[in-house]
Amino acid sequence: MKTASPMLDEVQAAKHLNVSPGTLSVWRSTGRYQLPFLKVGRKVRYRLSDLDAWLESRTRKTTSA
C-alpha cells in the first residue's frame, strides 16, 4: 500500500518544480511530460512523492542520451 504523500495544488506544485502554473497546465493538456496528477472535482492536485519521483527520473549525468 502506498503511504500518504502531501497533496499540492497547482501553484504549490509549480513552485516545487520551479515552473509556472501555466506551464503545468500546458504539460497536462498536451501530455508533453508524464507527470502524474489527480483530479478532485474541478481541482488538480499533485502528490509531492510523484513530483520528486518525476524529478529524479529526469536527472541526467551527461548530455548524451
Image: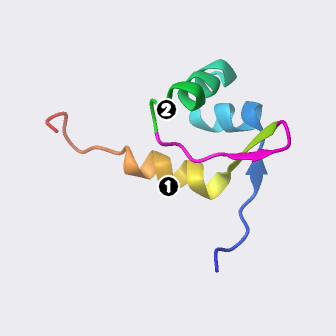
Q: Secondary structure at mark 1?
A: helix
In the rendered structure, which segment of residues is drawn in magenta? 34-42
Tell me the number on the disc at residue 53.
1
Q: Which residue is mark 2?
A: 31
User: Which amino acid is tagged 2?
Assistant: Gly
Given residues 32 and 6, the one toward you in this image is 32
- Image quarter of residue 39: top right
Main secondary structure of the magenta stretch? loop
Give x and y (percent) for residue 31.
49, 32
Tell me where residue 22 appears, x and y as whole percent: 65, 19
- Give the Cα separation between the discs numbered 2 and 1: 17 Å
In the rendered image, the vertical position of residue 37 relative to residue 17, given as above or below: below
Q: Secondary structure at mark 2?
A: loop
Few, some or many residues within 10 Å of mark 2 (<14, 14–19, 20+)? few
Q: Earlier in the sequence, mark 2 or mark 1?
A: 2
Q: Nearer the viewer, residue 41 or 23?
A: 41
Q: Quadrant of residue 23?
A: top right
Residue at the spot x=64%, y=74% of the render?
Answer: 2
Q: Is residue 15 left or right of residue 41?
A: left
Mark 1 is surrounded, within 10 Å at the Cα level, by few (under 14), some (14 to 19) or many (20 or more) other residues, namely few
State which quarter of the image contains the C terminus: top left
Amino acid, disc 1: Ala
Viewer can see residue 19: no
Name the colour scheme.
rainbow
Q: How many marks?
A: 2
Question: Compared to 26, does 1 lie above or below?
Answer: below
Q: Please tell me whether residue 19 belongs to the stretch shown in magenta.
A: no
**Quarter of the N terminus within the rendering:** bottom right
